[in-house]
C-alpha cells in the first residue's frame, strides 16, 4: 500500500476523502495534523488511519490539501520541492491567470508560476494533462456539474450562445464547509431556500474557463438547499441546429465511467448520486421552439470534491481511474 497524506482531514471534504481512501486497494491514507485546532476527538478503541504532524518532508508520494486557498498556497511550494505531488481541493490554483484570481478572490496571487503550472483536474476533459502531473487543482463542485453538462453541447455547436445560457444551481449545506456561520446554522437553513453570491460566485470563472463561454453569455445563480449534500443544476439554453443533445452526450461520454446519461424523458435527482462519484445528466429539447433544458446532479462532497480528487490521484500515480470509486 502506498501512503498518501491528507491535510484538512477534519473538514467535510477532507473527511469524505479519508473515507474513500480507506477503501482504496492501492493506497493508505495518512492524516497530517497541520493546525493545533485539528479535531482529535476519537473513540478509545480508534483504529483508523495513522496520524503524523504535518511536514513537507514526510516522503509521501502525494498529498491532498483539503484546506482554504491561502493555506494551500502556503503549503504547496514546500511539498513540491520535497518531491510530493499535490492534489489541491481549494480554489488556490483553479483560475489559470493572476488576473482571474485577483478579480474573483479580491487579492493578488503570490505564486503565479504555480497558478500557471497546475493542471485543472476535470478528467473527463483533461485526462492527458493530469496524468503524471505534480500539481493538480481539483475543480469546484458547481463547475464540475455545469461543465460536464455544457461543454459537450458547446463543442458540438449545438447551443445558440447569442441567446444566453441560464444555470440555476442548488447545493446542500455541506458545500459551505464545516466552519460555523449564521447563514448555515440550523435555524437559518431548515425549511428555507435562498440564493447567495449572485453575479459574484467564485465558481463562475471555472465554468467560463472550461466551457469557453464569455461571462456575458452565462447567468449563474447558486442557491442553498436545506439538505446535507448534493447538487442539482437546471440549465436552460436555445439549440442552434438539428443535433439531438441526448445523442451528443451519449457519444461524448461513451467511455467515461462516472457520467451517466438518462434516456429521453427521465431526469436525475440528488438521491440518485448521493455518496457516489457519478454525474447524472438528463436532457429535454423542443426542436420547434429550440428550447433545451439539462438537469445535472452530483454529490458535492464526492464528484464535486473528494471523489474527483481520488480520480485525479489515480491518474497522477498511474492507477486505474476507477480505483476506490466503483
Image (cartoon, grey):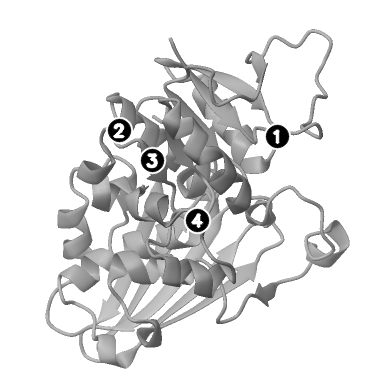
| Element on which disc 4 rests | helix
From the viewer's perspective, is the residue at label 4 or at label 3 nearer? 3
Q: Can you say whether 59 is above or below 316 in the image? A: above
Residue at x-position 58% and y-position 68%: 107
Task: Report the side of 224 relative to 129 (left or right).
Answer: right
| Element on which disc 1 rests | loop
Q: Earlier along the polypeptide chain: callout 3 or callout 2?
A: 3
Circle 1: is it few (<14), some (14-19), or many (20+) Cα within 10 Å?
many
Q: Are marks 1 and 3 in contact (CB under 8 Å)?
A: no
Q: Can you say whether 121 is above or below 55 in the image? A: below
Q: Earlier along the polypeptide chain: callout 1 or callout 3?
A: 1
Circle 3: is it few (<14), some (14-19), or many (20+) Cα within 10 Å?
many
Q: Which mark is on residue 135?
A: 3
Q: Are marks 2 and 1 in contact (CB under 8 Å)?
A: no
Instruction: Identify the residue under disc 1.
Output: 10
Q: Earlier along the polypeptide chain: callout 2 or callout 1?
A: 1
Name which quarter of the figure residue 202 lies in. bottom right
Q: Is residue 282 visible?
A: no
Residue at x-position 53% and y-position 58%: 231
Distance from disc 2 to disc 4, alpha carbons, whole Å, reads 19 Å
Task: Report the side of 86 relative to 39 (left or right).
Answer: left
Q: Are marks 3 and 2 in contact (CB under 8 Å)?
A: no
Q: Position of residue 108 (x, y in %)?
A: 54, 66
Residue at x-position 35% and y-position 55%: 116
Amino acid at each position: 500500500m502506498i501512503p498518501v497524506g491528507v491535510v484538512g482531514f477534519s473538514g467535510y471534504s477532507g473527511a469524505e476523502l479519508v473515507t474513500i481512501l480507506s477503501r482504496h486497494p492501492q493506497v493508505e491514507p495518512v492524516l497530517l495534523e497541520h493546525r493545533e485546532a485539528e479535531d482529535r476527538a476519537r473513540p478509545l478503541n480508534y483504529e483508523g488511519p495513522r496520524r503524523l504532524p504535518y511536514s513537507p518532508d514526510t516522503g509521501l508520494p502525494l498529498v491532498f490539501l483539503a484546506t482554504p486557498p491561502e493555506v494551500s498556497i502556503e503549503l504547496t511550494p514546500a511539498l513540491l520541492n520535497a518531491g510530493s505531488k499535490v492534489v489541491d481541493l481549494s480554489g488556490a490554483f483553479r483560475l489559470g491567470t493572476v488576473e482571474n484570481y485577483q478579480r474573483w478572490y479580491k487579492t493578488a496571487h503570490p505564486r503565479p508560476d504555480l497558478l500557471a503550472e497546475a493542471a485543472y483536474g476535470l478528467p473527463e476533459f483533461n485526462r492527458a494533462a493530469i496524468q503524471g502531473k505534480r500539481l493538480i487543482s481539483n475543480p469546484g463542485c458547481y463547475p464540475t456539474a455545469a461543465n460536464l453538462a455544457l461543454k459537450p453541447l458547446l463543442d458540438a455547436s449545438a447551443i445558440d450562445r447569442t441567446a444566453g445560457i441560464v444555470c440555476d444551481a442548488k447545493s446542500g449545506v455541506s458545500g459551505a464547509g464545516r466552519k460555523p456561520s449564521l447563514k448555515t446554522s440550523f435555524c437559518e437553513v431548515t425549511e428555507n431556500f435562498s440564493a447567495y453570491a449572485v453575479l459574484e460566485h467564485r465558481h463562475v470563472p471555472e465554468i467560463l474557463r472550461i466551457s469557453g463561454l464569455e461571462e456575458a453569455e452565462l447567468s449563474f445563480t447558486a442557491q442553498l438547499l436545506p439538505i446535507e449534500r448534493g447538487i442539482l443544476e437546471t440549465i436552460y439554453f436555445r439549440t442552434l441546429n438539428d443535433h439531438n443533445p441526448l445523442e451528443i452526450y451519449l457519444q461524448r461520454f461513451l467511455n467515461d465511467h462516472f457520467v451517466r446519461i438518462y434516456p429521453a424523458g427521465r431526469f436525475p435527482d440528488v438521491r440518485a448520486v448521493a455518496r457516489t462519484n457519478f454525474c447524472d445528466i438528463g436532457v429535454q429539447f423542443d426542436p420547434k421552439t429550440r428550447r433545451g433544458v439539462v438537469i445535472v446532479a452530483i454529490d458535492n462532497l464526492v464528484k464535486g470534491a473528494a471523489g474527483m480528487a481520488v480520480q485525479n490521484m489515480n491518474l497522477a500515480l498511474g492507477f486505474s481511474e476507477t480505483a476506490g470509486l466503483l
